[in-house]
Image (cartoon, grey):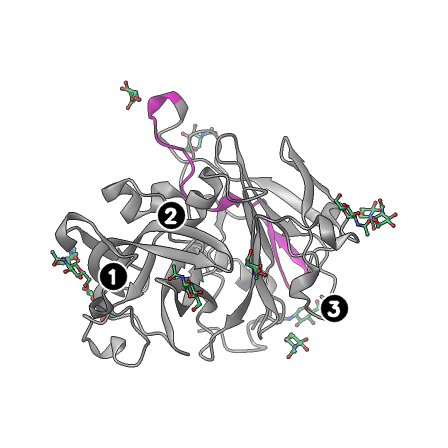
Amino acid sequence: MFSVLPFVVALAFLDACFAVGTLKRVQPPSVRSLEGRSGLESIENGVVNWGNSSNSSTTAQNSAIVPVVLSDDGQTYYTVISVANISFRIGLDTGSADLWLISSACSTSECSKVPKYQLDYHSPTFVPVNNNQTAFNVSFADGTAANGFIALETVQVSNLTVAQQGFGAVTSSNITFDDDVSGILGLGFPRLSDISQSISSAPYFAQLAQRGQLDYPLFGLSLTQNTSGSLTLGAVDGSVVNNISLIEWNEVVPFAPFGSESNASSYLQWTIPLSGLSVNGTALTPIPTYPGATSNNSLALFDVGTSGIFGPYQDVSMRDTVLDTRAYHIP
Ligand SMILES: *[C@@H]1O[C@H](CO)[C@@H](O)[C@H](O)[C@H]1NC(C)=O
Ligand SMILES: *[C@@H]1O[C@H](CO)[C@@H](O)[C@H](O)[C@H]1NC(C)=O
Ligand SMILES: *[C@@H]1O[C@H](CO)[C@@H](O)[C@H](O)[C@H]1NC(C)=O
Ligand SMILES: *[C@@H]1O[C@H](CO)[C@@H](O)[C@H](O)[C@H]1NC(C)=O
Ligand SMILES: *[C@@H]1O[C@H](CO)[C@@H](O)[C@H](O)[C@H]1NC(C)=O
Ligand SMILES: *[C@@H]1O[C@H](CO)[C@@H](O)[C@H](O)[C@H]1NC(C)=O
Ligand SMILES: *[C@@H]1O[C@H](CO)[C@@H](O)[C@H](O)[C@H]1NC(C)=O
Ligand SMILES: *[C@@H]1O[C@H](CO)[C@@H](O)[C@H](O)[C@H]1NC(C)=O
Ligand SMILES: *[C@@H]1O[C@H](CO)[C@@H](O)[C@H](O)[C@H]1NC(C)=O
Ligand SMILES: *[C@@H]1O[C@H](CO)[C@@H](O)[C@H](O)[C@H]1NC(C)=O
Ligand SMILES: *[C@@H]1O[C@H](CO)[C@@H](O)[C@H](O)[C@H]1NC(C)=O
Ligand SMILES: *[C@@H]1O[C@H](CO)[C@@H](O)[C@H](O)[C@H]1NC(C)=O
């Protein structure tokens, strides 16, 4: 049971380094104000300086802030995006990097209740790829999967528009969504994206950053158990983070192949070193599962698409050394 969910600010320096920021001390957000957003003054060498947030007219123009809601089943944080100028509720996921929507061609039972991307509307902004013959396949750790084909569409979050964004039009799926959620917006790195690999079309957030459509190449997520969360693109939600000094920046861990070994980015997952954890007030040191190329750190993945906190057996079982297991049932 988690009463406070982590707040994540992901900073993306597309050509230099990447960092993940988390709040050291979370001050309870006051009344949500989507108008009260703040720009950032500057980003230099991974250090972000706050702008004068009391002057709301200095608000960054190339940014967006939209509400994030937890679905009734507690499984998905979703927001509303526009695809082909039609609004869809879309699950947010930092552990994947593709945008996909259930399409009207999907007839599996899991698709029956959700609003679908209507293929027969013949949207004027739809651009086919390879006569709809390029397969889209995505699968998740829980064994569920979705298949379909890749196409291009106009995608918008608030006013941030990407024309000809690659997306998966799903024609078969056994992923269950609640609350009229129609698909997933993956906020992961291009290297993690199936669509980027097959048609060289970067994910939505990377497109915005690469095209200079964002004042700052970062996105932020504020997650709560109700409707008070937010997704910001190109800025930080000033109603959640009222002092940039409270954000602790961590470098994202790169994955091989590195630098000159490949032209591909070494950034794969929103992962940082996990130096320690504590259970009921007792500090524990995690045991690395895989030897790393540059260090043998344990790593932690920020995965907004997963409803829970998971770890390898050798780490999770350490709780038994500090918890009184008679106090409650541990399955
Ligand atoms: C921020 O801007 C307001 C309005 O321009 C000004 O009154 C205030 O002094 C500024 N604060 C700082 C810390 O610069
Ligand atoms: C806020 O900043 C803008 C741009 O720097 C400036 O033009 C405007 O006068 C400022 N507003 C106030 C109330 O200080
Ligand atoms: C999207 O919808 C709005 C409001 O209905 C309309 O003004 C706008 O022209 C539409 N844009 C496109 C690209 O169809
Ligand atoms: C590709 O899909 C679109 C949307 O359903 C459709 O309009 C188009 O005719 C399809 N193209 C082919 C070659 O099937
Ligand atoms: C979902 O479908 C995939 C094939 O697309 C299959 O491999 C998987 O076992 C299915 N999972 C569940 C939970 O039904
Ligand atoms: C990938 O998707 C295509 C098109 O929907 C489907 O025919 C194929 O079986 C899928 N492949 C896998 C490995 O699921
Ligand atoms: C989107 O842009 C239009 C035109 O520039 C503007 O009127 C509107 O307020 C903007 N909406 C948001 C949510 O920023
Ligand atoms: C949202 O959830 C938080 C934590 O559960 C709670 O403190 C807050 O009062 C809730 N806000 C609303 C508007 O329900
Ligand atoms: C922001 O937080 C830092 C560190 O706690 C503190 O030194 C600074 O005074 C704070 N700034 C404002 C404007 O509250
Ligand atoms: C990197 O890209 C350059 C230019 O496209 C190419 O010549 C070189 O072979 C590539 N290197 C690797 C390791 O793929
Ligand atoms: C990580 O651990 C492995 C296995 O114990 C060892 O071979 C390797 O040298 C270690 N790497 C570093 C950077 O310490
Ligand atoms: C947590 O620690 C407290 C104080 O040390 C202890 O009384 C309590 O039993 C512990 N809780 C569990 C579940 O072990």
Question: Is 301 positioned to the left or the right of 27 in the image?
Answer: left
Camera-nearest residue between 122 and 220: 122
Q: Nearer the viewer, residue 78 or 251?
A: 78
Quarter of the picture containing the N terminus is bottom right
Disc 2, SS: loop
Is residue 8 covered in magenta?
Answer: no
Where does the C terminus fall, quadrant-wise?
A: bottom left
Q: Is residue 28 left or right of residue 146?
A: right
- From the viewer's perspective, tell me whether residue 156 is left or right of residue 238: left
Q: Position of residue 171 (x, y in %)?
A: 19, 66
Q: Which residues are magenta?
A: 260-284
Q: Residue at x 44, y 78 (%)?
A: 73
Could you say where residue 19 lies in the image, as x and y percent from the top left?
A: 56, 40
* Ligand 4 within 8 Å, label 1 CB: yes
Relative to the observer, which residue lies in front, 289 or 32? 32
Q: Which residue is mark 2?
A: 203
Query: Label 1 vs label 2: CA separation?
Result: 15 Å
- Neighbor class of circle 3 (other Cα within 10 Å; few <14, some 14-19, many 20+) is few
In the rendered view, would you say 303 is above or below 291? below
Q: Which of the two labelled residues, at mark 3 and mark 1, occupies the earlier sequence position?
A: 3
Image x and y of residue 257, in percent: 35, 30
Residue 30 tag number = 3
Q: Amino acid at mark 2?
A: Pro
User: In front of the other: label 3 or label 1?
Assistant: 1
Secondary structure type for disc 3: loop
Q: CA distance from mark 3 to mark 1?
A: 39 Å
